[in-house]
Amino acid sequence: MIDFSLDDSGASGTLLLSGALTIQQALPLKETLLRAVGEVNQLKINLEHVEGMDLTALQLLCAAHRDWIKNGKKVTREGAIPEIVHRIVRESGFSGCVGDDDDIGLWTGASN
Amino acid sequence: MAVEIDTSAFTEEAYELLSELEDSLLELEETPTDMELIGRVFRAMHTIKGSGAMFGFDEVAKFTHEVETVFDKARSGTLPVTKALIDLTLAARDQIRTILDASRGGPPADQDNANRIIAGLRGLTPQKESAAAPVAVQAVAPVVPEGPHVYRVRFEPRPEIFSSGTNPLLLINEMRDLGHCRVIAITNAFPSLEELDPERCYTSWEIFLTTTEGENAIRDIFIFVEDDCTLNIRLLDREEEPDEMAQPKKLGEILVERGDISAEALDKALTPLGDRLVTSGVVPADKVRAALTEQRVVQEQRQQQGKAAEVDAVVRVPSTKLDKLVNLVGEMVTVQARLNQIATQFSNQHLQLVAEEIEHLTAELRDNTMSIRMLAIGSTFNKFKRLVRDLSTELGKQIELTTSGADTELDKTVIDQLNDPLVHIIRNSIDHGIEKPDVRQATGKPLVGQIHLSAVHSGTSVLIQVRDDGKGLDPQLLRRKAVEKGVLSPDAVLSDHEAYQLIFAAGFSTAEKITNVSGRGVGMDVVRKSIEGLRGSIDTQSELGKGTSITLKLPLTLAIIEGLLVSVNQNYFVVPLAAVEECVELAPKDIANSHGRRIVNVRGEIVPFIRIRERFDMSGERPTIEQIVIANVDGKRVGFGVDSVVGQHQTVIKNLGNSFEYSDEFSGATILGDGTVALLLDLARMVRYVEIQESKETGGS
Amino acid sequence: MAKTIMTVDDSSSVRQMVGLTLKGEGYQVVEAVDGKDALTKVGGATIDMVITDLNMPNMDGITLIRELRKLPAFKFVPIIMLTTESQADRKQEGKDAGATGWIVKPFKPEQLIGVIKKVLG
């Protein structure tokens, strides 16, 4: 499931991803990520119930992450990152492209 | 599925491939460097081999495997395509055809002919290698590398690869079945999120696989995507040229070799001003990371192989080459310091990442290089056995020399320059320290005197000690003599420990009469000078009637030291870190309390200090709060007043010319990250000069 | 959740053998006798992978692959062709149509499992 919701003030939002993020959901995932990058300055991202992801999801999250950093968005994580996600990230050789800026610990497995 | 295997599909395909193979080989004879043709020849053989095995054509598979293995060398560029290679490969092609014909009822294939072809092909590789080596080496090049080896697999899927139902991540995971993988995703081709087509693949990978399998096992994984990707497989630790084996490749070399950066761009990056490795986009960060991984994986593999080998091979290298290497490493350390500084200024994450990696690698490179120069001190120790034997006989003394720590290693240059000082010290012990047998007997000592020579590591220093059980030093006698000889002012107050150090003062000798062994007392101050020249120090301990021990504290290496960088009026100085004990602040009230004397109160202890600013007549205002670096100089605590303490600095020492004013108060210079020069302070000498100056001043007033 | 694999082959013995092998590995199996039949059955359960023969009456395997790739749900689904022809052009034709890979008949059950693991994970 891919869900993005704004909080009451409209200044921050929560991106909730769950289930298997595969190429079948790649298009909606991209649209949602674009919204999340564009609409708020403070973003909470929740991956706690992600059950799997493929390369398309990794590519999108990586590109979105670069946009967040470029645009100075404040991104925080809600809930833990499931071990399966860490494993996929690790096995795919994605280790973070912008040094220490792994604010949600997705690429480096940090803070989890 | 107990179905009769239909082999005609294979034989038909094989005949087709064989005629293709023939065409390619003839074409290749015309253009022997055409890599695409070489690739085509290789693939044809690979398919014949693979399908042959699947359809039970074991003879075809086995024979083709041998041919393919040799031809693989041509493909990887280690074997040139010669007429001989083409002739033999053509003959092999005919042989495969004969085997196939035989399976369909033709005349049987001639096994001898097959063996001749294989032998001929194998002959192409070892002959070439032994011709290149100056000495005849028993070059038996293994066709497939023995034991585990490292492959670099570059896997670049086409953007449309998902449309064929392929999941590239599964292929990468499949490689893990072959051995240990280190996977690096190259993500620099990603467009912005806005422009990213989520159903296209933008990622490529570099995978470093440590495996016992051959290249074909890797190719088989990618068999379905042969046309949907670019696949580049390279054996990394192949022993191509003997010279290259010794050390894993440098990062820069790897980047150049991998085609990630041009040699010119690398040169530019390595020049002192080259600060644009990653920022300018010459190399994407992922590529650098991949190159670093490559370096590490190969290194680890080499180490593993090294462990497996029972005895380390020893290479004799002229020491000039080593000196050159050390110089280069020194330059490298300097450039690296600059890179670090620049990286900090730019505050660019990518650049910092690279700078950190380079820092790490440089440190390792430095340590490795220094360790090459390290020699055990044992050979020097052994020389003294003869010296002790001869001298003691001459003087009618009985002395036994014992040693410990002979395997302690230190820089070759230090060892070379240590010989003479040690000879002086040992001679002195034999001459002045150890008593004659009758004296020893009278004092209840064993007849045979003992001299113990020891070496031990202590941090970044080596302590070399000469200890005897002779008569020891008499501090009163030393003081009296020193005053008599004008070395010491009559009202000087010296502790016993300070008095012992007098034996190293110029023109000082306590021997009652001059012997031809220890001469006129010129020896010991020469010792002191030599040791200080090596950036070392001497400490003497003694107990009257029991013996004396003289300890030389020497740096492990001369080329690079850890220093404390300090500044005075925007000039930089380096204090050898080994000597530094602590740093304290000197506030105006402390100065007021000291009534004009240059002393600082450190937790109740009075420590004299020298202001660097005053010592070198430097202009500029003193800061309100000065920093005092307290160092141990010849066993005494002495402070050095500076404006500020910058921090720890890895110092590559450059020699200074003699034309410099105060030049002997500096033991060298070093270049800082931003290019400014910092002078390395020779604390002991500075303290001595200041003492002389002060005693003159007080004497004159 | 068990994955579902569709097998398309006009030979009942092959379908049976493939079906048994797949079920033995815990997969759900949907069978079809040719391309046309397959297309009528894809609307049901989610199909995670297709294994299809090439030479079939009504609609051959290559055409089936092309038709499947046009369907959004099958755009990226792995499709394996069963082929007796090891010639490059036949494989190539299938690849161009959108096949993920192939397995050459005759094959052993473990080879089939190997290929499925390779493309399906």
Image (tube, coloured by chain):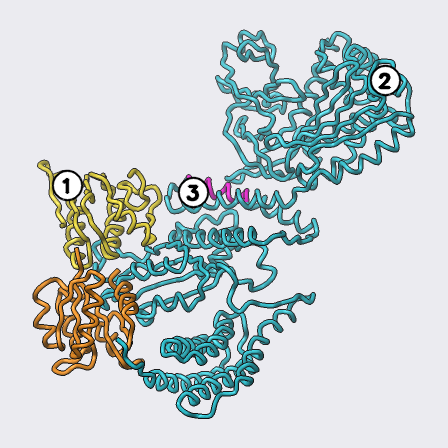
Chain colours: A yellow, B cyan, C orange
Residue B224 image point, x, y percent = 30, 70
Label 3 and label 2: CA atoms lie apart by: 67 Å
Front-most of residues B342 and B521:
B521
Q: CA distance from mark 1 to mark 2?
A: 92 Å
- The residue lying at 88 percent from left, 26 percent from top is B519
- Mark identifier at residue B343: 3
Circle 1 Cα neighbour tier, 10 Å, few/some/many (<14 / 14–19 / ≥20)? many
**Magenta residues, start to end:** B333-344
Residue displayed at 16% across by 48% down: A18
Viewer-nearest residue: C102 or B394? C102
Q: For the residue labelled by badge 2, is the local secondary structure a helix, a strand or a loop?
A: helix
Query: Residue B44 falls in which quadrant of the image?
Result: bottom left
Residue B210 horizontal side relative to residue B380, left or right: left
Q: Position of residue B252 (x, y in %)?
A: 49, 54
Q: Nearer the viewer, mark 1 or mark 2?
A: 2
* Residue behind mark 2: B440
Q: Amino acid at mark 3?
A: Ala
Instruction: Give the Cα separation between the discs numbered 3 and 1.
Output: 35 Å
Q: Which residue is mark 1?
A: A13
